[in-house]
Image (tube, rainbow, N blue to C red):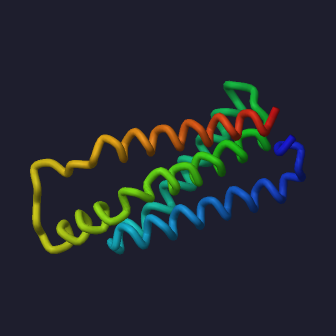
Amino acid sequence: MLASLPAVWLWLMAAAATVVVCSALGKWIPDRRFRTWFPVILVVCGAGMVAYGQLTAGHELGQMLVLYSFTLIGLTIGLFPTRKLMTTYAEEINRGVKRERYDYPRSHIVFLVFVVVAMAFAAFVLTQ
């Protein structure tokens, strides 16, 4: 259903999802290097995911773009409870404080995994 939209709209949806996740994580992790390299890495990995899905798994371009968009939005929603902790850790790292471990609450990790998997499942359902 969603994958049957014109490709232009799917590319715009993927670009909007990329902008949303980069903006959110750029605000939550105040580091200039992260803000510079994260979008580049995200786009390269997303292009690789789309190409891999088309070449080996036989999925259409529309299906892969919807999956990319939905999982990025799921990542943003899933990281929302951890935003203050990520900001604190990033500020400590910028000041030169080194910890042996950066602990995240297990509930935040479970929530992140659940939301990303749910969004990927929703993308799968909406593209069939």
Q: Percent position (x, y) of residue 102?
A: 19, 51
Q: Nearer the viewer, residue 82 or 101?
A: 82
Q: Nearer the viewer, residue 92 or 55?
A: 92
Q: Where does the C terminus fall, quadrant-wise?
A: top right
Q: Percent position (x, y) of residue 21?
A: 53, 61
- Residue at point 34% right, 73% down? 30
Q: Percent position (x, y) of residue 120?
A: 62, 38
- The correct choice, above or below, for 39 with respect to 52 in the image is below
- Residue at point 46% right, 39% down? 113
Left or right: where does residue 48 sit relative to residue 85?
Answer: right
Q: Quadrant of residue 52?
A: top right
In this rendering, the count of numbered labels is 0
- Name the outermost residue toward the front: 107
Q: Percent position (x, y) of residue 73?
A: 59, 54
- Residue at point 42% right, 73% down? 27
Left or right: where does residue 54 sit relative to residue 107?
Answer: right
Left or right: where does residue 92 sit relative to residue 127?
Answer: left
- Name the outermost residue toward the top: 57
- Residue at point 49% right, 67% down? 24
Q: Nearer the viewer, residue 35 or 123?
A: 123
Left or right: where does residue 1 sit relative to residue 54?
Answer: right
Q: Where does the N terminus fall, quadrant-wise?
A: top right
- The correct choice, above or below, for 67 with respect to 15 in the image is above
